[in-house]
Amino acid sequence: MNMRPNSITEIDNRIPLLPLSGALLLPHTQRPLLIFEPRYVALINDILSKNRVMGLIQPENDSEESPGDQDTPLKKIGSLGYLRAFEEQNDGKYVVVLDGLSRFEILKEVPTDTPYRMAEINIEPYADDFDPDTGIDQVNREEFLALMRAYSDFANFEFDWDGIKKIDTTQLVNMCCVMSPYGAVEKQALLEAKSLNQRAQTLIALAEMEMAKAGAKGPSSGIQ
């Protein structure tokens, strides 16, 4: 069985791509996906016999969830996912779970005879994504938790708050971003945040704006 990569030295510089609008995967989080298009079923089959690593990336135009055109422009920054678990369905589809490893930058797409796209990538700027302790000292955890709790009440989300309080700060921030209901543009901004604290503050700002428009109050923000 292939082992989950733990550093950039264990990642190939060429990866298969799964373009998917609105899909966010961040380091130290997990994301389930239903894989049903034949080209991406082929992708899963291929990486199962290799290193189980793939790139999840958004198209520039978010009007189509999974663009069929191989020339559709893609965002430059995406997420590396490790295929943690999979279940093959009777109809040939896959239900998979991806572990978020790190972000990556597309340097160029490379010619391939596969039905899915391939790219040469650079992950050196995101080497710290593998370390869950990077930047946690800059995050005001209590402020973040208070706002997320206020937002969950506003949006009628149910969370296991006792369980959430036990997870580390990186996982907390990134998990909340992945689960957030925002669109492709906002998801890309969360992905490209320069630091964990910037990501946390971006999500806080998005939640505060949404609650303010509805006339709801934040925990101590004075939002009317």
Image (cartoon, rainbow, N blue to C red):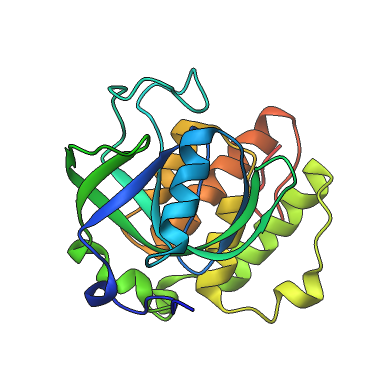
* Residue 80 appearing in the image: no
Locate residue 171 relative to residue 114 in the image: left or right. right
Q: Residue at x 35, y 26 (%)?
A: 60
Q: Nearer the viewer, residue 56 or 76?
A: 56
- The C terminus appears in which quarter of the rendering? top right
Q: Position of residue 87 (x, y in %)?
A: 68, 58
Q: Position of residue 167 (x, y in %)?
A: 64, 78
Q: Residue at x 18, y 65 (%)?
A: 124
Q: Residue at x 47, y 70 (%)?
A: 139
Q: Position of residue 97 (x, y in %)?
A: 60, 59
Locate residue 118 relative to residue 50 in the image: left or right. left
Locate residue 156 relative to residue 68 in the image: left or right. right
**Vertical order, 196 against 108 (above or below):** below
Q: Quadrant of residue 158?
A: bottom right
**Vertical order, 108 against 45 (above or below):** above
* Residue 43 appearing in the image: yes
Locate residue 88 relative to residue 153 in the image: left or right. left
Q: Position of residue 216 (x, y in %)?
A: 76, 38
Q: Nearer the viewer, residue 121 or 118?
A: 118
Q: Nearer the viewer, residue 76 or 48?
A: 48
Q: How many marks?
A: 0
